[in-house]
């Protein structure tokens, strides 16, 4: 007589069964098993199993083996980045009662013909660190103080349990196009913070005037040398005569607070994709050399993709009378004028007596 329904040997308040599997494991591989008990004998003791909840994507399957166990298998590709934990509700029943037992219902701990299984997906290191921007152009002034921040690189790793990414200065090459000079500086010339990716100066760059550096930064979080990414920076060595400046009618502290938003808005005021590099926020220096503590000068450079826009074109671009959007932004951010960063002074006239 078939008078004993199958059920799992567990307490009504039992915790879920825990199983662990590595992502990207082969399809049809066994993940684990569950075992129910039916006190009947012979054909009446045969038990079937079904996953009735938590398997909407059909990632897992379950089938009975010849020992009446429910074998849980992987039916579809498992990706840790999509989900790291799957909570399944498995029901046991007699084969003749399948239709009545496999309706989708959340887990009910009071029903002993149900058991909850949690499958934790171990992360496989199948993604490399990837720089958000691989090609950048920046500038450094010849008289920049040591430890001046030039820029920052950042990489992400899509692996859910990825280790912390470290940054390393891989190589620096200096070029002076006017003379055709090229010098390999190896891992020197700049500082790269291994944790943050911030790039700083570590020397004076007067001897590198009229040139630029090709800088390679490496991001890695694995002993495997193939699991890395590289960012390539072109850093121009700039003199004040190579730059323009904004003159703000407010002090440097207030200008610095809005600089990120100001830069974004100014770049968006032009039809072509221009990049604005701003190098400092200092008290405005008057013609006589005295400082105006209520105003700020911020020297800047404009790039069109990776090419530097010459100063004559920059002056034309920043003529607010030709660009209403730009004029509105100048009013919004209290920009009084756009000038040359360094004033070109004509030499004084000397008569024959002097």
Image (tube, rainbow, N blue to C red):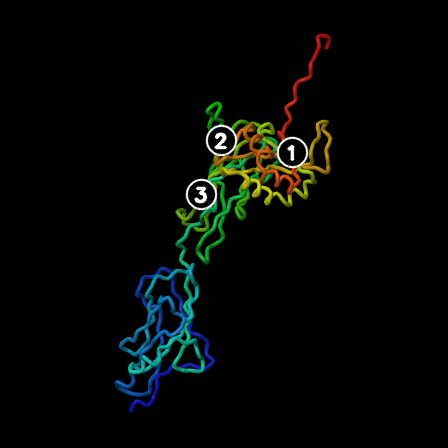
Name the residue: 41% across, 55% down. Answer: 125
Name the residue: 47% across, 37% down. Answer: 171
Residue that lies at the very extreme toward the top in this rendered image:
352
| Residue 9 occupies quadrant | bottom left
Along the polypeptide, which appears first: circle 2 or circle 3? Answer: 2
Name the residue: 73% across, 30% down. Answer: 290
Name the residue: 43% across, 63% down. Answer: 84
| Residue underneath mark 3 | 230
At mark 1, the secondary structure is: strand
Quarter of the image that includes the N terminus = bottom left
The numbered dot on residue 174 is 2
| Residue underneath mark 1 | 337
Give left or right: position of 341 versus 68. right
**Above/below status of 58 relative to 259:** below
Along the polypeptide, which appears first: circle 1 or circle 3? Answer: 3
At mark 2, the secondary structure is: strand
Determine contact: label 1, label 2, CB under 8 Å: no
Give residue 245's position: percent from left, percent from top.
Answer: 62, 33
**Above/below status of 13 relative to 157:** below
**Above/below status of 114 relative to 73:** below
């Amino acid at each position: 007589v078939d008078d004993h329904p199958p059920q799992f040997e567990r307490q009504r308040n039992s915790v879920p069964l825990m199983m662990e599997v590595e992502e990207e494991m082969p399809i049809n591989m066994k993940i684990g098993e569950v075992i129910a008990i039916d006190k009947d004998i012979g054909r009446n003791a045969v038990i079937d199993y079904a996953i009735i909840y938590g398997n909407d994507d059909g990632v897992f399957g379950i089938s009975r083996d010849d020992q009446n166990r429910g074998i849980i298998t992987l039916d579809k590709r498992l990706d840790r980045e999509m989900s790291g934990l799957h909570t399944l509700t498995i029901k046991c029943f007699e084969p003749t009662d399948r239709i009545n037992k496999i309706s989708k219902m959340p887990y009910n701990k009071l029903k002993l013909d149900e058991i909850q299984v949690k499958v934790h997906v171990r992360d496989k290191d199948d993604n490399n660190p990837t720089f958000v921007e691989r090609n950048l152009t920046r500038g450094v002034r010849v008289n920049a103080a040591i430890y001046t921040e030039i820029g920052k690189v950042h990489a992400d790793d899509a692996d859910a349990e990825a280790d912390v990414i470290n940054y390393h200065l891989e190589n620096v090459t200096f070029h002076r196009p006017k003379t055709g000079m090229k010098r390999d500086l190896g891992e020197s010339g700049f500082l790269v913070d291994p944790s943050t990716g911030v790039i700083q100066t570590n020397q004076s760059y007067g001897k590198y005037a009229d040139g630029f550096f090709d800088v390679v930064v490496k991001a890695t979080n694995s002993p495997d040398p193939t699991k890395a990414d590289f960012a390539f920076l072109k850093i121009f060595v700039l003199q004040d005569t190579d730059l323009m400046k904004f003159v703000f009618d407010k002090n440097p502290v207030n200008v610095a607070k809005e600089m990120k938003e100001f830069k974004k808005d100014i770049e968006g005021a032009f039809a072509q994709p221009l990049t604005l590099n701003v190098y400092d926020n200092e008290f405005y220096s008057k013609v006589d050399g005295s400082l105006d503590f209520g105003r700020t000068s911020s020297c800047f450079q404009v790039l069109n993709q990776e090419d530097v826009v010459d100063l004559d074109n920059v002056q034309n671009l920043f003529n607010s009378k030709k660009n209403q959007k730009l004029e509105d932004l100048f009013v919004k951010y209290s920009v009084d004028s756009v000038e040359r960063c360094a004033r070109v002074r004509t030499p004084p006239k000397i008569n024959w007596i002097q």
